[in-house]
Image: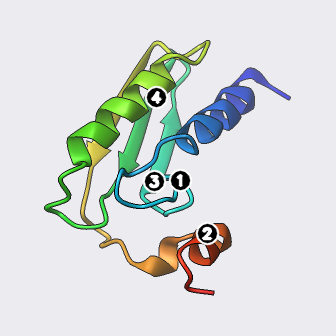
């Protein structure tokens, strides 16, 4: 497997350790991560949303993501961009998240 794919797998694994303090599901399975762009120079750009624009945990989530992604070997910098288009809905959640939250 090439280095790019290894770093991307490590990023997804790290994102699965980031939890909204009010929801017992990680941000990746919750469907909050819209895009992960790993550049050749080691910069990672992550586009994500929040369950609501007024989410009080937004700043905490961004800092937690940056800390964990910046700790991955090969990553020089992690930028997190919060977006609200498209709007988040529960349809973005993984089956595991739906099950955990009692939607299945």
Nearer the observer: mark 1 or 4; the answer is 1
Give the CA separation, mark 2 to mark 3: 12 Å
Instruction: Identify residue for label 4.
Output: 44
In percent of width and height, residue 19 lies at 45, 48
Pointer 1 with pointer 2, Cβ within 8 A? yes
Q: Residue 94: give its label.
A: 2
Give the CA separation, mark 2 to mark 4: 23 Å
Dot placed on the residue nearer the N-terminal end, 2 or 4: 4
Tag 2 secondary structure: loop
Give the CA separation, mark 1 to mark 4: 16 Å
Which corner quadrant of the image does residue 104 belong to? bottom right
**Image height check: is 54 above or below 93?**
above
Residue occupying image coordinates x 38% and y 52% = 20
* Residue 86 or residue 17, whichever sits in front: 17
Q: Residue furthest left?
A: 54
Q: How crowded is mark 2: few (under 14 residues within 10 Å), some or many (20 or more)?
A: some
Pointer 3 with pointer 4, Cβ within 8 A? no
Give the CA separation, mark 1 to mark 3: 6 Å
Give the CA separation, mark 3 to mark 4: 13 Å
In percent of width and height, residue 44 lies at 46, 28
Dot placed on the residue nearer the N-terminal end, 2 or 3: 3
Instruction: Identify residue for label 3.
Output: 33
Q: Residue 61: give its label.
A: none
In percent of width and height, residue 31 lies at 49, 63
């Amino acid at each position: 497997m090439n280095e790019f794919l290894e770093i991307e797998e490590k990023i997804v694994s790290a994102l699965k350790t980031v939890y909204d303090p009010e929801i017992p599901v990680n941000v990746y399975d919750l469907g909050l991560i819209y895009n992960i762009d790993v550049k050749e120079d080691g910069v990672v750009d992550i586009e994500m949303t929040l369950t609501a624009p007024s989410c009080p945990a937004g700043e905490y989530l961004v800092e937690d993501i940056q800390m964990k992604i910046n700790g991955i070997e090969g990553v020089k910098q992690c930028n997190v961009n919060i977006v609200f288009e498209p709007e988040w809905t529960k349809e973005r959640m993984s089956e595991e998240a739906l099950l955990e939250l009692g939607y299945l």
